[in-house]
Image (cartoon, rainbow, N blue to C red):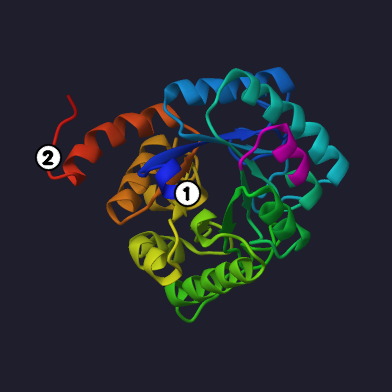
Amino acid sequence: MDALVARLPGPALMGIVNVTPDSFSDGGRFAERDAAITHGLELVAQGAAIVDVGGESTRPGAEAVSEADELQRVVDVVAGIRAGSTTPISIDTMKSAVAEAAIGAGATMVNDVTACTFDPRIIDVVRDAEVDICVMHMQGEPRTMQDAPTYDDVVREVGDYLWSRVEALVAAGIDPRRIAVDPGIGFGKTVEHNVALLAATRELGEATGCPVLIGVSRKRFLGALLGDPERDRTVATVAAGMAAVERGAWMLRVHDVAPHAEALAVLRPVLGSGTVPA
């Protein structure tokens, strides 16, 4: 069985398809099935190595979505993208029934922001289907996670948590070569916490033994760093992503694939000691 990083070599891009009416950045734009499928295929054409389809917003303050609603939102979209492309598809969900249905429709990865703690059966679904899994750190839950996030040592605590979840997955029978970790930038963290975690991307990978997925796309802390919460965050997102790649990030989860693909086209030969592709 090939390792995750062999099938999806980094640094690479995960394109976001939010099939929701209330995501913080693009809520409603792709909530309709055909628009979401078209958008997913456009992200592939722009350079996404994998497409991440989600039917429940996890923005700060977000309300929970029923299993039935989430299934209705995402399954046909996964099937439609799969029909139009061989590019891998990830399902962004914390619910085992949604993961199972999405895998049946063509998804080959589960991206769980609760690290398989909301619905532990999702571990069995991933193991039995032999698909990949990304587990994320979040302090609290979406409705309250940004109220007052606190850590004594954010890098150590996030790293320890992610390692404990990796251990739990492996103990349940999941191949460790199929596991990625995400420090959860913006999920129960202050601006300072987010910056510290980005700076420690390589350290988090070494602590867990897993490839690290980073999601900073258009997040609020970037507006805070810019000194303007209403300012467009595309350039800031690319800058933060490239900083993470320089520090060992395997995958960037992004809304805007095209500018990230251009930035990576420049950064890759630099990271590769100056070898320019023919």
Classify 202 as above or below 217. below
> Of residues 183 and 27, which is closer to you in this image?
183
The answer to which image quadrant residue 33 occupies is top right
The disc at residue 260 is: none
Classify 199 as above or below 103. below
Residue 12, given in percent of the width and then of the height, sits at 39, 40
Q: Can residue 148 be found in the magenta stretch? A: no
Name which residue lies at 78% across and 60% down. Answer: 121
Helix, strand or loop for disc 1: helix
Q: Which residue is mark 2?
A: 274
At label 1, counting other C-alpha atoms closer than 10 Å, the crowd grade (few under 14, some 14-19, many 20 or more) is many
- First to last magenta residue range: 100-108
Helix, strand or loop for disc 2: loop
Q: CA distance from mark 1 to mark 2?
A: 26 Å
Q: Which residue is mark 1?
A: 4
Classify 261 as above or below 205. above
- Residue furthest toward the left? 274
In this rendering, position of residue 235 left or right of residue 277: right
Name which residue lies at 58% across and 25% down. Answer: 40
- Residue furthest toward the front? 1
Can residue 64 be seen from the camera position used here?
A: no
Tell me whether the residue at label 1 lies in contact with that at label 2, contact meaning CB atoms closer than 8 angstroms. Answer: no
Name which residue lies at 61% across and 62% down. Answer: 146
Q: Can residue 103 be found in the magenta stretch? A: yes
Residue 231, given in percent of the width and then of the height, sits at 45, 38
Identified by mark 2, the residue type is Gly
- State which tag comes first along the sequence, 1 or 2: 1
In this rendering, position of residue 87 left or right of residue 5: right
> Of residues 237 and 50, which is closer to you in this image?
50
Name which residue lies at 66% across and 19% down. Answer: 35
Residue 209, given in percent of the width and then of the height, sits at 43, 66
